[in-house]
Amino acid sequence: MKSSFLFLAFGVATFLVCGCAVPTVEYERLREKYDKLELECENLRSENLKLARNNEILAAKLAGREAQLSAAQSIIEALKKEQEEKPPTAGETKILPSEWKTNPETGGIVLEDEILFAPGKAELSAKGKEMVSKLAKILNSEKYKGYLVRVDGHTDDTPVVKTKEENIDNWFLSARRAHSVLTVLLKEGVAPERLYLSGFGEIRPIEPNAPNKKGNPKNRRVEILLMKPPQK
């Protein structure tokens, strides 16, 4: 395209220099092609600028996701180390190091609903409260207090049946569960301006659900994501 453009430009320039060396009809034809190619070049330049900008945005998002995952993994390692070095005292619920997990796709800290909640319920279990309390202590540390904390509730695709009067659907149940976790974080001193929640229901599984709405326990979870505040 570049060589064609130069050829046409040369043709038009020749006409301008040599006067009537090119017939008027031929000149108009060349001029039309020249204008068309010039417009195409301008569109390509514009498209290249858009692609470059999109690449910058994607790179920034990737860097942000990697930073989130790195922070989540550091927190998990700290919690596991604490569990290994400090066995539970009398009255405390034993939390296994393997129960602290991250989701590499989202960069979130995963708390599985079998640990946190009774089936179809949104009230935290004693063990769930203890896990969230331990997490809150780290979130309040100097290292992490600059992060926003997003609490995401998720379910599998099993329809709500037994607790239909309390939870009209899976979105409602997932939001209530996220709110229960957020409430404990708030109670444990995580600043309210750092906290917000989302209820995703069944729409963001991390593994395939079983056929015929039989679900998958891995998808029933609350995820806690550390987010850097937007730049002012």
Image (cartoon, helix red, strand yellow):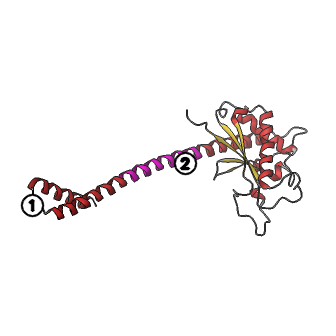
Q: CA distance from mark 1 to mark 2?
A: 58 Å
Q: Is residue 179 visible?
A: yes
Query: Would you name the residue on which mark 2 appears?
Result: 62
Nearest the viewer among 32 and 91 is 32
* Image location of residue 65, percent across then percent down: 59, 46
| Viewer-nearest residue: 152 or 217 | 152
**Residue range (magenta):** 45-66
Please report whichever mark, 1 or 2, sits nearer to the chain's N-terminal start: 1
Picture quarter with the C terminus: top right
Q: Residue at coordinates 72% horizontally, 43% vertically from top-left?
A: 197
Q: Is residue 72 left or right of residue 26?
A: right
The image shows residue 71, relative to residue 42, as above or below, that is above
Type of amino acid at the residue the image marks with label 1: Ala
Q: Is residue 231 above or below residue 210?
A: above
Dot 2 amino acid type: Leu
- Residue bearing the label numbered 1: 21
Q: Position of residue 28 (x, y in %)?
A: 21, 61
Viewer-closest of 167 and 213? 167
Q: Return the residue nearer the eye: 29 or 116.
A: 29
Q: Is residue 46 toward the left or the right of residue 216 in the image?
A: left
Q: Residue at x 81, y 45 (%)?
A: 95
Residue 163 in percent (x, y) is at 88, 55
Q: Is residue 65 magenta?
A: yes
Above or below 47: residue 90 = above
Q: Main secondary structure of the magenta part?
A: helix
